[in-house]
Amino acid sequence: MTVIMIFIILLPILAILAIISRKHFSKYKGELWFVPQIAGRLQKMEVLYGRSLEDATRQYVEQGFRHILILLAVLWFVALGIFMMPATDPAEGEIQRPEAGKSAEKITLQLTDGTDTEAYILNVEPRELTEEEFAAAADRAVSQVREKMAGKNADLQHVTGDLSLPERDPSGLLKISWDTDRLTVISRSGAVHREDLEEETVVTVKGTFSDGIHEAFLEESVTVLPYSATETAIEKAIRELGRLEENSRKEGKLLLPEQIDNVNVSEKKTTIKNTICKLYIFLVLFACILAVRKFSREKEILKKRDEELEKVFYRFSRRLTLLISAGENIHSALLQAAAVEERYLLPEVQYAMNRIGTGTAEAGVYVQLGRSLGLKSYIRLFSTISTAGPRGSSQLMRLLDQEVRDAETEAREEAKKKGEKAQEKLLIPMVLLMIVVIGIVIYPAVAGM
């Protein structure tokens, strides 16, 4: 235990000294691996470059160090306080007994005779009521239970539904047990069974209120009405059908009457029309699922196509510029440059060249080619070719060079964004690692309590 305590005390001190040394004295302080990530995040939040970005990053890092130092200091003082506390409190000679009606409590005591120590669990029962306290509590409980005993019935003389027979009084102080002289009609839980009654039946319900020592009683006469006195025509028909089914269980068939006391009886069968309707609904749902799945797959394919075309645009535009500057004509240069992507780009360019070969106007074909590819970069490029191509190669080369520079800038920015996303994903493992380290530091203190 002493070794663990020393470890808990020294570890935060060493961590604080290491952080301070790393920040102020290390020759690598400007190369901390997380500083570029912080600078990138700050640059996203506001326009910062050069000296202003360095100052903002330094302030952010210093503020983070201050927070970490404060956290380590708090953890250190908490751990120190935990270990300085005695493992057990000496018994004060008084244990507060639970109030009457509450659950018993278990108190852990430590018995020491100088050399040997043993833990003992003492079961402390709740306080017992005096006779006067029980009499007052029982009178109050009997009155409250009697008021709600009828449940949803109008009163206890016209009972058709279950009674409300609670297991404890509303205060929870007294336990109640129930009994009746006709358990087949009213059970101990208050459930009423009147299916076989031919006439009104009086049942005596008795409740015993107890705190474990004293007892008080509640006795009520309850009149249960037969079904014939309250049931509707349909309820009578249901009861009669149940009786018919029970009496004919030894026979192979059950004969249904057409009427029971003016209630028409007919078997509800699943018709072919109903089956077809269900099948139709199923087919509609199935078709919707297939359509959604198809559209989702198409969307994924289009997304993949756009990503692939965007990925090769810089190579395509650069290669096209080099070929034209080397003396190739536009048609040949386009076909050779499009070979960098043979799945989507090359077929579109080949189709466009075939249209030009059949006599279609070049300017319109190039504009249509850009629209077919669908991305802004391609639309801009082929619009440039359609407008500048007829004016001469010098004008076209100047515009293509600008397109290449723009494409290079966009590719660099896209790569930068992907790198920033990857760095942000690394923050989650960092946070988890910090939580694990804090847990390792605190766990010995908690385990030793």
Image (cartoon, helix red, strand yellow):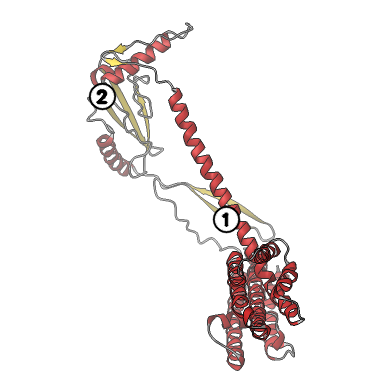
Q: How many marks?
A: 2
> On the rendered structure, is 285 left or right of 64?
left
**Closer to the camera in the image, 262 or 441:** 262
> Mark number for residue 174?
none
Q: Position of residue 340 (x, y in %)?
A: 74, 68
Which residue is at 61% across, 88% downward? 58
> On the rendered structure, is 109 left or right of 172?
right
> Mark number for residue 109?
1
Question: Which residue lies under the disc numbered 2?
Answer: 221
Label 2 element class: strand
Q: Amino acid at mark 1?
A: Leu
- From this viewpoint, is residue 35 visible? no
Q: Amino acid at mark 2?
A: Ser
Judged by depth in the image, the label closer to the viewer, 1 or 2, is 2
Label 1 element class: strand
**Quarter location, residue 28:** bottom right
Label 1 packing within 10 angstroms: few (<14), some (14-19), many (20+): some
**Quarter location, residue 75:** bottom right
Quadrant including the C terminus: bottom right
Q: Position of residue 130 (x, y in %)?
A: 34, 44
C-alpha gap between disc 1 and disc 2? 52 Å
Q: Which residue reaches farthest right?
A: 326
Note whether 436 is above or below 18 in the view shown: above
Note whether 84 is above or below 399 in the view shown: above
Label 2 packing within 10 angstroms: few (<14), some (14-19), many (20+): few
- From this viewpoint, is residue 199 visible? yes
- Mark 2 and mark 1 in contact (Cβ < 8 Å)? no
**Quarter location, residue 319:** bottom right
